[in-house]
Image (cartoon, grey):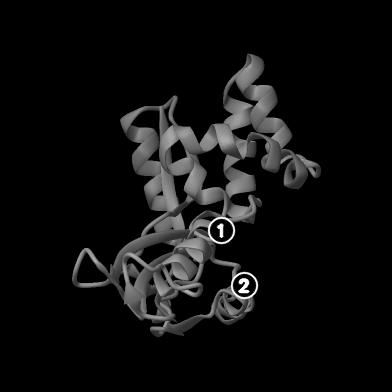
Amino acid sequence: PVMPIALGEKSSLWLDLRAEGEPGHGSLPPARQATLNLARFLSNTAGFGTPRLHPVMREQFAALGRATSGTLAALLRALASPAGGGFVRVVAPQLRRRGAIGALLSDTISLTMFNAGYKHNVVPGEATAALDCRLLPDTEPNDFLEHLRRKAGPFGVDISARPPMRSPVSERGLLWDALVHASQALDAACVVVPTISPAMTDVRFFRKRGA
């Protein structure tokens, strides 16, 4: 049995995208279309970023590697090793099929809204979209945003950002000790590991106040 205790959460960055193009009739497709430009940018952007190991996840893999055996233990120990940063890029595609663990190995970008047009035979001159970006705690939101804007430039896509929601990673303290004790009281064989939540919660307000 594994008891994961969240020391932190991924940051949330919400983006609004807008692309302009030549409006026209559906029978005569314009050369520069807002919908196509925006869709091409999104197809090159949405999804998982470059895999990497946050220190909390490296520690989790190390703890799990000590608690198991065989091929799984070898995999976990490899991820926790100094070479884990390169190894995670190899195994991340497989780990993404195992639920939340894949989302904790990279920044992610989800397309949540796409709006354009009003009629079947009219090519719209504008298209908009919304992205929900979830960033590992050590990703700087401003750097992430500037990188996306550089990618969006050639597609004629403008990006505006809502204020990011961030939650610092907590140090271990009395609460950690209490949770470990309570977990082991329920099952002495349980493995307590640190982790990161892939989603944001209201705990970010308490963490900012030192809780």
Residue at the spot 53% in from the left edge and 80% down from the top edge: 156
Q: Position of residue 144 (x, y in %)?
A: 59, 74
Q: Which mark is residue 9?
A: none
Give the quarter of the image for residue 12. Answer: bottom left
Question: Marks 1 and 2: CB-CB under 8 Å?
Answer: yes
For the N terminus, give its image quadrant.
top left
- Residue 76 at least partly seen: yes
Q: Residue reaching furthest left?
A: 119
Residue at the spot 41% in from the left edge and 37% down from the top edge: 99
- Mark toward the start of the polypeptide (1 vs 2): 1
For the C terminus, give its image quadrant.
bottom left
Identify the residue under disc 2. Answer: 151
Q: Secondary structure at mark 1?
A: loop
Q: Position of residue 119 (x, y in %)?
A: 19, 69
The answer to which of 39 and 79 lies nearer the viewer is: 39
Amino acid carrying mark 2 in the image: Lys
Q: Which mark is residue 44?
A: 1
Task: Answer above or below: position of 110 versus 139.
Answer: above
Residue at the spot 33% in from the left edge and 65% down from the top edge: 27
